[in-house]
Image: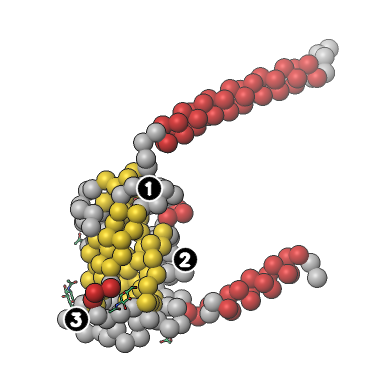
Amino acid sequence: MGTRAVILASLLVACLAQACDGNVLFSSLSRTLVVEASPTAGQVLKSGEDKIKVTWSFNGTHSGKDTDYKTVKVKLCYAPVSQKDRGWRKTVDNLKKDKTCPHLIVARPYSSSAPNNSFEWTVTKDIPKATYFIRVYAINASANEVGYGQTTNKNKTTNLFEVDAITGRHTSLDIASVCFSAFSVLSLAGFFIGEKRRAKKSSPPHM
Ligand SMILES: *[C@@H]1O[C@H](CO)[C@@H](O)[C@H](O)[C@H]1NC(C)=O
Ligand SMILES: *[C@@H]1O[C@H](CO)[C@@H](O)[C@H](O)[C@H]1NC(C)=O
Ligand SMILES: *[C@@H]1O[C@H](CO)[C@@H](O)[C@H](O)[C@H]1NC(C)=O
Ligand SMILES: *[C@@H]1O[C@H](CO)[C@@H](O)[C@H](O)[C@H]1NC(C)=O
């Protein structure tokens, strides 16, 4: 059996294990949770230092029910302005493929009574500089999203906040990348000049 067949077979098994048919579309979810977070609109948080406090609760006036909610997943999500031209952060309606909210802040058992439905998180250092909002998913017993809430409007344009890297780190990175690009341009130029010379030398003499 070839390697390719083995890979295909294991992909199939992996797919069956996570229930291929359990694909949930974001557009099918109701906004049943009221979510609040401590950052104010436009606030800039420093990764590795600043904290975010998130609070969530079931919207009692909503017609839906929370009886099948087993856990919640609190996530940090990219605002559209930070997704532009970045395919790897793309929003896809199928939540298995969606890249809007790649940063899990915490997963907690769901409780309909309010007191424990909050979490304080220090922005970790791996969070890239970007504009964000918070979204909380309600998850049922078969690990599918069944409801959500978020700190921004439907169009993801209001109440956004920013995360910035700790100063010092990105300046040295920037310098390194500028040097590196200059070096690659120069070596590429060198390569072409070398090639031309070689081509001239090896071309047959004219009669
Ligand atoms: C709660 O749900 C109702 C009905 O969907 C909606 O009109 C209201 O704005 C929601 N409240 C909050 C705080 O999200
Ligand atoms: C809240 O959380 C604490 C600590 O995790 C736990 O001891 C307590 O029972 C929880 N209370 C409720 C109402 O869930
Ligand atoms: C969880 O939600 C998914 C998607 O709505 C549904 O297909 C599945 O039957 C639900 N599981 C349970 C245990 O309610
Ligand atoms: C949301 O975006 C759509 C499409 O871009 C637009 O038509 C609509 O007016 C926007 N709604 C709000 C509340 O900004």
Read off the residue under disc 3: 60
Query: CB of residue at label 3: within 8 Å of ligand 1?
Result: yes
Instruction: Determine whether 53 is above or below 197 in the image.
Output: below
Tell me which label, 1 or 3, sits earlier in the chain. Answer: 1
Read off the residue under disc 1: 48
Residue at 38%, 81% in the rendered image:
70
Task: Give the SS element for disc 3.
Answer: loop
Tell me which label, 3 or 2, sits earlier in the chain. Answer: 3
- Asked whether the residues under the numbered discs 1 and 3 touch, taking CB atoms below 8 Å apart as contact, a structural biologist would say no
Q: Quadrant of ligand 2?
A: bottom left
Label 3 vs label 2: CA separation?
A: 30 Å
Please tell me the numbered disc located at residue 97: 2
Q: What residue type is labelled 2?
A: Lys
Label 1 vs label 3: CA separation?
A: 36 Å
On the question of residue 29 being in view, the answer is: no
In the rendered view of the protein, which quadrant contains the N terminus? bottom right
